[in-house]
Amino acid sequence: MSADAPTLLVSRDGPVTIMTLSRPQARNAVDGPTARALAQAFERFEADDTSCVAVLNGANGHFCAGADLKALADEQRRNRLAADGHAPMGPSRMLLSKPVIAAISGYAVAGGLELALWCDLRIVEASAVMGVFCRRFGVPLIDGGTVRLPRLIGLSRALDLILTGRAIGADEALQFGLANRVVADGQALSAALALAHELAALPQSCLRNDRRSAYDQFDLTLPQALAHEFSLGMQTIASGETDAGASRFAAGAGRHGGRIG
């Protein structure tokens, strides 16, 4: 691969933005420049009103093997290590207003697992491998892994992975709730894109406000969380989406759980 070749490829499929890590010589491990490119790409996605969902994937058969440890000795290529601003892997401190889906093939380990945890949903190929592989090298989880993994799968299961650094396959990941869907090898990206288009076709104010409530509730007491949910729900109703949806339902659309449109 040429040294001048982009390490992050960004493309569009209608309302879906596709971000593809492309460092095949390192199983898509992320160095400093790639982390910056990834954070900046997600900032552009967040600001783009025409893009509703993002899909994050890796080229050449792997999602991401974590931070590029070989770049640590290179001042120009090492990952940023600071408590504020962009995280070492790039976007993992960002809370976007729109969903991101990870399409996982091959290895999603160490910081790559943390990127997958940062995403809202994870579509995982049958032969994919996940794990806190950095455990073996004394490299800490500093991109949200110790926070998001217990929230997603519970403390006991999270500690099993965090403390041992063992590999976890797709079936166990699905059992744990780490994977949302398991698909055949070679199908993660297409399945993630299909799901992304489903989400993009839904009423967006309602989807985004309900998503925000689900994330925000971690920092709130139960009464606060319920009040916050109600406030966001009222914003959705004020947007007109609820009245429009009720009218479509009254006209016969979406009955018995059927899709609309």
Image (spheres, rainbow, N blue to C red):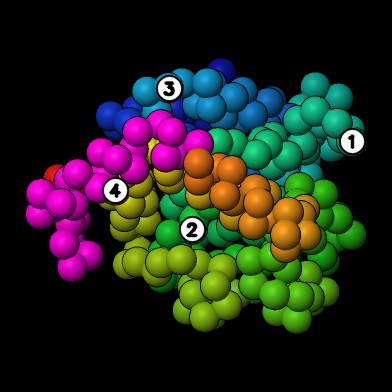
Q: Is residue 105 left or right of residue 227?
A: left
Q: Which residues are magenta?
A: 235-259
Q: Secondary structure at mark 4?
A: helix
Q: Position of residue 158 (x, y in %)?
A: 73, 73
**Front: mark 2 or 3:** 3
Residue 198 numbered mark, or none: 4
Few, some or many residues within 10 Å of mark 1 (<14, 14–19, 20+): few
Few, some or many residues within 10 Å of mark 4 (<14, 14–19, 20+): few
- Which of disc 2 and disc 4 is earlier in sequence? 2
Disc 1 target residue: 83
Marks 4 and 2 in Cβ contact (< 8 Å): no
Disc 4 versus disc 1: distance between alpha carbons? 36 Å
Q: Position of residue 1 (x, y in %)?
A: 51, 30
- Which of disc 3 and disc 1 is earlier in sequence? 3
- Which of disc 1 and disc 4 is earlier in sequence? 1
| Screen quadrant of the C terminus | top left
Disc 2 target residue: 122
Q: Amino acid at mark 3?
A: Asp
Is residue 216 positioned above or below 128 on the image?
Answer: above
Disc 2 versus disc 1: distance between alpha carbons? 27 Å
